[in-house]
């Protein structure tokens, strides 16, 4: 069994959501930690990640402030969003799934990540690294993020479906 750490300088947790029903707003979280476990054969077996909600960045300070407020994430009351894996299934050297639980805003729900293995190699300092890309979609209202505004021509200001994309580089034993 080995433990791998996220190299957050070479990784990103990002998201996108519909705005006014026809455009997308994108953002990311700047501070997060976690680790990945592998079994005796080196296969990925567990994932744990914790994101600091107040590190949300959509490149618009007023929007970020609103997202941190009680209307959305309520970062003061719920400062951390977390993922804990429950099962890993599929071809671990290709495409596979990680099933687990996502907790945010005081709500925990099952989530399945679609994962693509990116490869493994040694860096110039002798550390073993691996890359993965994971994606999923969630409905924000399932987690109690319900704020919205009706549009004059119909529809709502903020979509409910959130697309999540995770690009990771892991370092063994770091």
Image: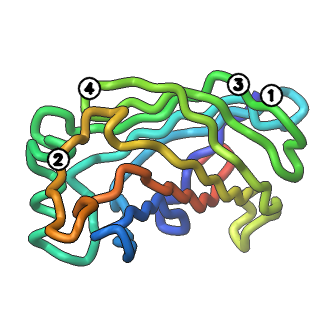
Mark 4–mark 2 distance (CA, rounded to whole Å) = 16 Å
Q: Residue at x 87, y 52 (%)?
A: 94
Q: How many marks?
A: 4
Q: Does residue 142 appear to the left or right of 168 in the view shown?
A: left
Mark 4–mark 1 distance (CA, rounded to whole Å) = 31 Å
Location of the N terminus by quadrant is top right
Q: How crowded is mark 3: few (under 14 residues within 10 Å), some or many (20 or more)?
A: few
Disc 3 vs disc 2: which is toward the camera?
2
Which residue is labeled 3 in the image? Answer: 87
Disc 1 vs disc 2: which is toward the camera?
2
Q: Do the residues labelled 4 and 2 touch (CB within 8 Å)?
A: no
Instruction: Point out the tag, 1 or 2, that comes first from the N-terminus.
Output: 1
Disc 4 vs disc 2: which is toward the camera?
2
Q: Does residue 31 appear to the left or right of 11 in the view shown?
A: left
Which residue is labeled 2 in the image? Answer: 147
The secondary structure type at the circle numbered 2 is: loop
Instruction: Point out the tag, 3 or 4, that comes first from the N-terminus.
Output: 3
């Amino acid at each position: 069994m080995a433990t791998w750490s996220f190299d957050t300088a070479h990784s990103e947790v990002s998201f996108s959501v519909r705005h006014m029903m026809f455009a997308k707003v994108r953002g990311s979280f700047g501070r997060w930690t976690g680790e990945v476990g592998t079994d005796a054969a080196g296969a990925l077996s567990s994932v744990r990640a914790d994101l600091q909600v107040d590190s949300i960045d959509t490149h618009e300070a007023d929007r970020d402030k609103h997202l941190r407020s009680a209307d959305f994430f309520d970062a003061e009351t719920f400062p951390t969003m977390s993922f804990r894996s429950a099962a890993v299934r599929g071809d671990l050297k290709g495409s596979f799934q990680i099933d687990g639980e996502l907790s945010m805003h005081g709500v925990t729900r099952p989530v399945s990540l679609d994962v693509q293995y990116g490869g493994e190699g040694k860096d110039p300092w002798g550390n073993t690294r691996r890359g993965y890309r994971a994606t999923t979609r969630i409905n924000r209202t399932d987690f109690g993020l319900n704020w919205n505004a009706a549009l004059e021509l119909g529809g709502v200001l903020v979509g409910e479906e959130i697309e999540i994309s995770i690009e990771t580089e892991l370092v063994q034993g770091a």
